[in-house]
Image (tube, rainbow, N blue to C red):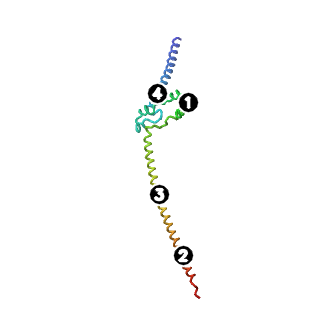
Amino acid sequence: RLLFDLSFFIIVITIGLNVVFGIIVDTFSELREERSDVETDQKSTCFICDLPNHEFERKGTGFRHHVKYEHNMWDYVYYSLYLDSIDTGDHNAIQKYVYKLIDKRDTRFFPQEEATCLAGDEDATEILINELIGKIDYILQHFKDKEQAKSVIAKKEEQRKWEREVLRTRQDSRLKSSSFSMESSQPFDK
């Protein structure tokens, strides 16, 4: 009986401990995997603007520079602590807006997929597009002005033509009336 109790105790304890150790090992491996995912995410995307690091390597000053100087997450933490430390009556309009959003746990004041170092390329493209639109508008206006000038010249020509016809008609009618008056002023021959 002692041997049976001792073997049962050893087997149950061993199996129980293995189950507990298995759970502990699985939990730690999950935690390690989560931590690895977090580190990968921190190294590959900006915490503030959520843009991938290759965008900054390709267009900007580099991802490390962006995360350290442009979108330093600790600057946002310090700013929220600063807003908490001063009286709400002393807030200006922007501080009041951000403070209310932080109080509601709303992150709309974070730049969503925007970064100033990347905006320069878009601005240059936008400037070029606006210049092209301006040139096209100028060309269209030039052609409209030419067409309008042609139209004005054609209308003036029509006006002159009409005036000449009216003058001719008046002269003809005057000639007819003067010849008629001459005929009427002559005595009738009987």
Q: Earlier in the sequence, mark 1 or mark 3?
A: 1
Q: Residue furthest right?
A: 190
Which residue is found at the position 41% from the left and 33% from the top? 65
Single out the mark in the foreground, 1 or 3: 1
Image height check: is 11 above or below 31?
above
How far across and down, in percent of the image, does residue 106 sit? 54, 33
Task: State how many labels appear.
Answer: 4
Residue named by callout 1: 89
Disc 3 on helix, strand or loop?
Answer: helix
Q: Earlier in the sequence, mark 3 or mark 4?
A: 4
Dots 2 and 3: beta carbons under 8 Å? Answer: no
How far across and down, in percent of the image, does residue 146 sit? 46, 59
Q: Earlier in the sequence, mark 4 or mark 1?
A: 4
How far across and down, in percent of the image, does residue 113 sit? 48, 37
Residue named by callout 2: 174
Which residue type carries mark 2? Arg
Front position in the image: 110 or 151:
151
Which residue type carries mark 3? Asp
Q: Residue furthest bottom?
A: 190
Q: CA distance from mark 1 to mark 3?
A: 59 Å
The label shown at residue 145 is: 3
Q: CA distance from mark 1 to mark 2?
A: 93 Å
Q: Earlier in the sequence, mark 2 or mark 3?
A: 3
The label shown at residue 35 is: 4
Image height check: is 97 above or below 155?
above
Q: Earlier in the sequence, mark 1 or mark 2?
A: 1
Which residue is found at the position 57% from the left and 82% from the top? 185
Front position in the image: 93 or 37:
93
Image height check: is 44 above or below 7?
below
